[in-house]
Image: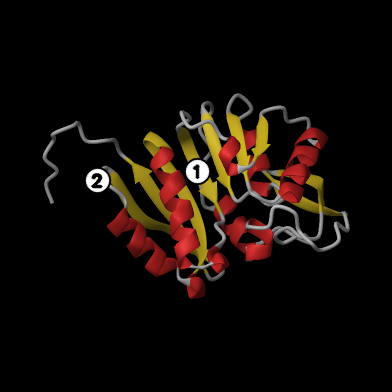
Amino acid sequence: MGSDHYFSASPASPENLRRVRVVLAGREVELTTAGGVFSPDRLDGGTAVLLANTPPSPPGGNLLDLGCGWGPIALSLAMTSPHATVWAVDVNERALDLVRRNAQSLGLDNVNAVTPDDVPDDIAFRTIRSNPPIRVGKSELHGLLERWIPRLDERSDAWLVVQRNLGSDSLQRWLAATLEPGFSVHRAATGRGFRVIRVRRHGTPPTGAITLP
C-alpha cells in the first residue's frame, strides 16, 4: 500500500469506479473499487494469503481491519462474525466510502468504516487483521503498529501479512523487541512470497509483578 493510498485523505487520481468479483468468506461477491485505493483491480496477493491463513474471526466483540482499502478483510470479518462490530480503519476517505458502499451491497450492518481518530479510545479489539502499508517507510509503519497493537484485548491476536522481500522478518524481530511483556510474536504461515505474522496478547502483568526472562 503506497503512501498515496494509505496516507492521502483525498486521492488526487480520478475515482474511476469499477466492479470486481472476488471470493470472501467462501462466497463469490461483486464489489465496487476505484482508483486511488490499494489494489483496485483485484484481491491483492498478500490479502489473499492473510485470508487463507487466519482462523475464523471471534464471534463477537470489536474486530479491526487496519488499513482497510476497499474492504476485503473487513467485509470477510463482518460476513463470518455477524454479531461482532467490525472497524474498517483508513485515512483514505475514498476507501472508506467504498467499504460503506460494499457493506451495504452485501447487507452487512456491522461495519464501521472510519478514520483512525474516529475509533473510541476505550475500545479493545478481539482481533486485528491487516495488510499494513509497508511502503510508507519504517518510521510511519512502526508508529502505526505501536498505536494499534496494544489495543488488543487479553488473549487476542493480531494477524499481519507482509511480503518477505519488503522486510517481513525484520518487522517480526522489531515487534518482538518492542512490544511490552505479555505479547508474543511468531511467523504463522508463509505463502506466495508473503509471511503471516501472529502477535498474541496473553495478558497484562499485574502492577508490580516481576516478569521473568
**Of callouts 2 and 1, which one flags the residue occurring earlier in the amino acid sequence?**
1
Q: Quadrant of the N terminus?
A: bottom right
Q: Nearer the viewer, residue 158 or 28?
A: 158
Mark 1 highlights which residue? 128
Q: Nearer the viewer, residue 32 or 52?
A: 32
Marks 2 & 1, CB-CB < 8 Å contact: no
Q: Which mark is residue 76?
A: none
Mark 2 highlights which residue? 181
- In the rendered image, residue 200, in percent from the top left (x then y), is placed at 36, 44
Q: Nearer the viewer, residue 151 or 72?
A: 151
- In the picture shown, does residue 186 fall above or below 64? below
Left or right: 50, with 99 as reference point: left
Residue at left offset 59%, top offset 61%? 46
Secondary structure category for the residue under label 1: strand
Q: CA distance from mark 2 to mark 1?
A: 19 Å
Secondary structure category for the residue under label 2: loop
- In the rendered image, residue 23, in percent from the top left (x then y), is placed at 72, 49
